[in-house]
Structure formats: C-alpha cells, structure tokens
Amino acid sequence: MSEAFRNLLRKVGSGPHTSEDLTRTEAAAATRMMLTQEATPAQIGAFMIAHRIKRPTGEELAGMLDAYDELGPKLTPIAAPVPTVVMSIPYDGRSRTAPVNPLVALLLATVGCPVVMHGGRRMPTKEGIPLIEIWQGLGVDWSTLSLAQVQWVFEQTKLGLIYLPTHFPLAEGLVSYREEIGKRPPFATLELFWCPYAGDALLVCGFVHPPTEEMARSAFALRGTNRFMTVKGLEGSCDLPRERTCIIGVHRPLRATALGGSPNQTELERLLLHPRDYGFDAAEVPLKDEGKYLDQIKTVLQGEPSELLESTIWSGGFYLWQSGLCSDLAIGLKEARRLLTSGKVLQFLKELQEAVEKV
C-alpha cells in the first residue's frame, strides 16, 4: 500500500462537506502513482469513484495532464504550413450517431494540414465504436504500429494516431477500473484535454456538458495552452451537429499589443453556427448497424451522394476554415465537397494505406 497515495485519497474521498481539492502538484503525483501502479487496486478504484463524486477542478486536471506529459507518448513536430490539429473525442466511442472524425482527418491531411488522433479499444461505459475500428474498416490498422512507426507514417502523410494499448500501456492499465466501477472517472475528461503532440497544435476538445468547457479553460490557462477549441459535438465528439446550433469556443493567444495581456492568456470567440444558414440542417445520421456504417463511409470517399457525405462536408468545411486553409466557412464547405467528390481524399487514403503497409 502507498501511504503517500492514501493521504491524497483522504483529501478527495472525505465526503461532500469535508473533501478537499488537490493542488496541481498533488494531482500530478496521484496520477503518476496510479499510472505506475504504485497505488494498489483498491486505492485506484476508490480514488476514481471519489474523484468522480467530488468532480475534478481545472487545477487538478492541469496536474493530471502534467503526469500524462511526463509518462505518455508524443509525436514529434513536423514542418507544415498550418498548426497540427489534434482531435480529442471520448474514448468510449459512439453508439447513436455515425462518426465522421476519420473522414475529416483524411480530408485535412489531403491538403497538407497535419492531424493527430488518439484513443483506445472498446471502452466502458458506452462501449461504442472506437476510432481504431473505423480506421481498420478503412484499411489502416494503427494498432500494429510502434510509436516510431506511427511517427514515420505521420511524417510521410501528415496523419497519425496514438493507440493506448500499444503506445501508452500505463494508461491502458487503468481501463479495467472503468469496467469495474461502471462509471466514467475524471480520466475520461483528462483524455479530452490531452495533446500527444510535441509541436505547435490546435487542440480540439469535444464536450457534452458546459462545465467541461470551463474546466478546459482553467486547466489550459495554468498550463500555458493558448490555442484550443471546444466543440459541443455529437456525443461529445468533434463532429458538428446538423439538427441543432453548433456551439463552439475558439481560444487564441491574446493580442498583447492591443490588450496588454501575457502570451499565455487567451481570447475567446464564441461561434454559434446554424446549419440551416448553410443548407446543412437535417436529422443526424444514425449508427444502427456498424457493418453497414463502415460500408457507408467508403461510399463517402467515392463521392456518392448521401446524408453521411453531407455531414462530412459540414464538419470538414468547418475545420478547413478553422485550420487556416480557407478564409471563411462558405469557402471551406465548397472546398470540402470538391475534395471528396473529385476522389482526392480517396487517393490520399490509398497513399496512407501504402505508407502503413510499408513500415
């Protein structure tokens, strides 16, 4: 048993009236002890459920991210005309609506915007379809690659995926606790804020509940992260909805010359995008049969008309705009449609498949 961990557990697990928040240093230490299994299974499970009941703070999440940075993998920087887009989505996948994240990643990389994704296997509590299985359905199996091999593919194609079981086994070792407690621990929030890329990045965090957005702002302010985006997307993902207003927070470095702020501060632009204003309002594409869905995404890459194609264009056009490759949303949407219907994204997928097979 870890006496040091027990003292931290006491702070968060003392109940609604006497529990205390951890400092950033304490949260980093607790996370480190859980990742390395210095804490016992009983201690880890107790901490996860107690911390969920207490709710994490931005300072605690900053400390947890410090530990992930210390012990976790990172892809090293590559040269590109725009910052790398790091897309962070819930690791327990999607179960109700059809994902377009991998298609958007392919679209961005086709025109030179690097993209890093990360995730794991089927994971509680939702047990939805994870990124790794969608990529496997597209003929790209990231799970078989070492971190060095992913880095090589990333350098060749500008697209990479960090897969927890292969590339961060310490974090994978905590997944069984989620299965046993039957609830999302604060690590599920941490994963939305984690950036496994060491260079200049635009971190995109999907979220469902508004407090998550505030926790992101607090944690990133402490860590000096001044370029990130929060997206109230489908099932907490980065995919833009089509049957409701898109609520997005774009955080950029504060313009010190005009406002006198420090380089680590950010300014927030709140975007409220109405799909009907651009002709994209429609019911969300349901995820009823995963096998049929994997067939549907292949038809999108062939440019065949479908609602899933329209959903891909809606999200893809937005990210072309926000990554700096298009000057406004309307142009981004037009460019996304052209890239998909011309076969350019499909051709890029073939190049990605060849790169993965070559390593």
Image: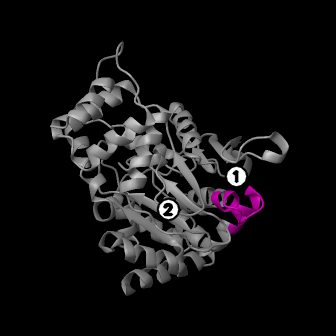
Indicate yes or no whether the magenta region holds residue 109.
no
Q: Residue at x 45, y 79 (%)?
A: 152
The amino acid sitting under disc 1 is: Gly
Percent across and percent down for residue 5 are 25, 35
Query: How far apart in space, not on screen, are marks 2 and 1 (Cα)?
Result: 35 Å
Q: Residue at x 44, y 74 (%)?
A: 151
Percent across and percent down for residue 104 are 55, 63
Nearer to me, 96 or 47 = 47
Q: Please tell me which of labels 2 and 1 falls first in the chain.
A: 2
Nearer to me, 146 or 141 = 146
Nearer to me, 118 or 217 = 217
The image quadrant of residue 22 is top left
Q: Which residues are magenta?
A: 319-335
Percent across and percent down for residue 359 are 37, 84
Give the side of residue 250 with respect to residue 289, left or right. Answer: right
Q: Is residue 271 above or below residue 152?
A: above
